[in-house]
Amino acid sequence: MLEYFTIGKIVNTHGVRGELKVIPETDDPGRFSKLKTVRVKLRNNVTEYEVERARGQGTFILLKLKGIDTPEQGMLLKNSLLEVHRKDAIKLPEGMWFIGDLIGCSVFEDDGNCLGKVINVLQTGSNDVYEVTDDQGRTILIPALKTVVLDVNIEEAVIKVKLLPGLKEIYYEN
């Protein structure tokens, strides 16, 4: 399981007081207003900052970090990822998981056949879709529907599914 989750990306500065323009990478952008601290990760450099304030501006979040007081200081953080520790992550309702926890899970059919590992989760709007690749490089897209995904065990990194009729044949016949 991941220890830290990415919640946004710094894409620019805003104004003259060091505010940062952030693209949220979370389903709940309101979570930024509750942040006390955040990790800023640029390549292999990670620094923790205290959050002074956050506010929405259209699809962006304007974030003020303690110690970042000028646009020049803010520009040094451009393209950084914002991360929070698992203990500070939002609490998910039953039956929902963090995408980062699903990546790498082995996917098995209900008969025990291994389909591969989750390499990506596509968010389509109506339901998520798990992109699963096997050892031969074949990929299958599995809709994350209650009728398809029977069980998710993050601790064991295993997902059990019941594929819709014909789904496997579409992907594996080529």
Image (cartoon, helix red, strand yellow):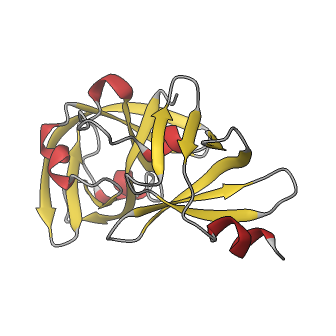
Q: Is residue 56 left or right of residue 125?
A: left
Residue at (37%, 28%) from the top-left corner?
A: 85
- Closer-to-camera residue (33/50): 33
Task: List x then y, in percent, for residue 44.
Answer: 62, 39
In screen coordinates, is 19 left or right of 2? left
Q: Count the marks.
A: 0
Residue drawn at the location 84% of the way across and 77% of the way down: 174
For the point 33% across and 71% down, the residue is 125
Residue pushed farthest right?
A: 136
Pinpoint residue 97: horizontal percent, then vertical percent: 38, 40
Above/below status of 103 relative to 76: above
Answer left or right for 138 relative to 109: right
Left/right of residue 130 with respect to residue 37 in the rendered view: right
Q: Position of residue 72 (x, y in %)?
A: 37, 57
Between 147 and 62, the one nearer to me in the picture: 147
**Residue 11 location (% of width, % of height):** 39, 64
Q: Quadrant of residue 156?
A: top right
At 24% from the left and 66% from the top, the residue drawn is: 60
Instruction: Please tell me which residue lies in front, 169 or 141.
Output: 169
